[in-house]
Image (cartoon, rainbow, N blue to C red):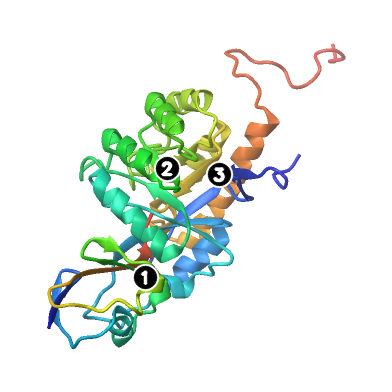
Amino acid sequence: MQIHVNGETATIDEMSLLHYLESLAIDPRRVAVELNLDILPKAAYGTTLLRDGDRLEIVHFVGGG
Amino acid sequence: MSNANDKLTIAGREFTSRLMVGTGKYADFPQMVAAIETSGAEIITVAVRRVNISDRSKESLLDHIDLKKYTLLPNTAGCYTADDAIRTCRLAREAGLSDFVKLEVLGDEKTLFPDNEELLKAAAVLVKEGFTVLPYTTDDPIVCKKLEDIGCAAVMPLGAPIGSGLGIRNPYNIRIILDTVRVPVIVDAGVGTASDAAIAMELGCDGVLMNTGIAGAKDPVAMAEAMNLAVRAGRLAFRAGRIPKKLFATASSPVEGTIE
């Protein structure tokens, strides 16, 4: 299935958001995730299954003023 | 009199340092860490951006920051509408688990001046959602009063445009703002060198926030130390109470007893 992540298209197997983050070596404690414009609480990452066509925004902190 | 017991209180939280620094524009993470450490700052600003999905090799900012030591102040840099700024703040809270946000809603890419209309809209929503809102605004006392009335925890008028290094361009407006609001007044943006920071503090500001002034200096770590000293010196001078300015001289040595 295809999902849209940070403006890019990715082809992935069916999995939870937590598994997807782990597959990218992203520490779930260090990011915030929007799924189809709704912010997901961290506790929901493990139980949220990604679906075809989902739009994800995964953000973190970078240097800024 | 020293600055030791002179705390800055924002939304009930006490801070010893009145200098807040950014984390952007450094050559590398070790330089950033050294500059922040040397600045003595306890509050540091960060930006919220997409994680690079295709290239996971880059180090993460938070790997280099001791979160027990510093309070993160996520910003909404790059947001041009209230909606974008609100969305960014909500993401920042989820990423950082803190309610502190530096709210900026920009009006124009060339000046990076705030769009105060959108800023006020965003501030009202965020305060209702429980955020501790520190808004970057123009040096406009009326807007600062409105931001205070909305419930912002501080107001952060610019000294000059972001990254311009022009210093405190309108010290009279800053003084009027200080006279108008009761929440902390933190000069945010425009500081180019140590004397600019000292001037802000001598005016009676509660703090100064800067990024480019330090990170853009030839030697950022040395400039961080200069800013640390300047903010403390300016604060102490303000508390000490400066002499009034006079047009003519007043002798420092006694007039009596001069030889004839």
Report how far apart the C-alphas of labels 1 and 3 lie in the structure.
Answer: 25 Å
Mark closest to the chain's N terminus, 2 or 3 = 3
Where, quadrant-wise, is the N terminus of chain B in this rendering?
top right
* Marks 2 and 3 belong to one chain: yes
Label 2 sits on a secondary structure element that is helix
Seen at 49% across and 68% down, the residue is: B33
| Classed neighbour count for the residue bearing mark 3: other residues with Cα under 10 Å, few (<14), some (14–19), many (≥20) | some
| Classed neighbour count for the residue bearing mark 1: other residues with Cα under 10 Å, few (<14), some (14–19), many (≥20) | many
Q: Is residue B28 visible?
A: no
Where does the image place residue B66, in percent across and percent down from the top left?
54, 70
Write down the residue under mark 2.
B127
* Marks 1 and 3 belong to one chain: no
> For the residues carrying marks 2 and 3, which lies nearer the camera in this image?
2
Write down the residue under mark 3.
B11
Write down the residue under mark 1.
A31
Seen at 33% across and 35% down, the residue is: B120
Q: With respect to residue B31, does B98 lie above or below?
A: above
Q: With respect to residue B222, does B106 lie above or below?
A: above
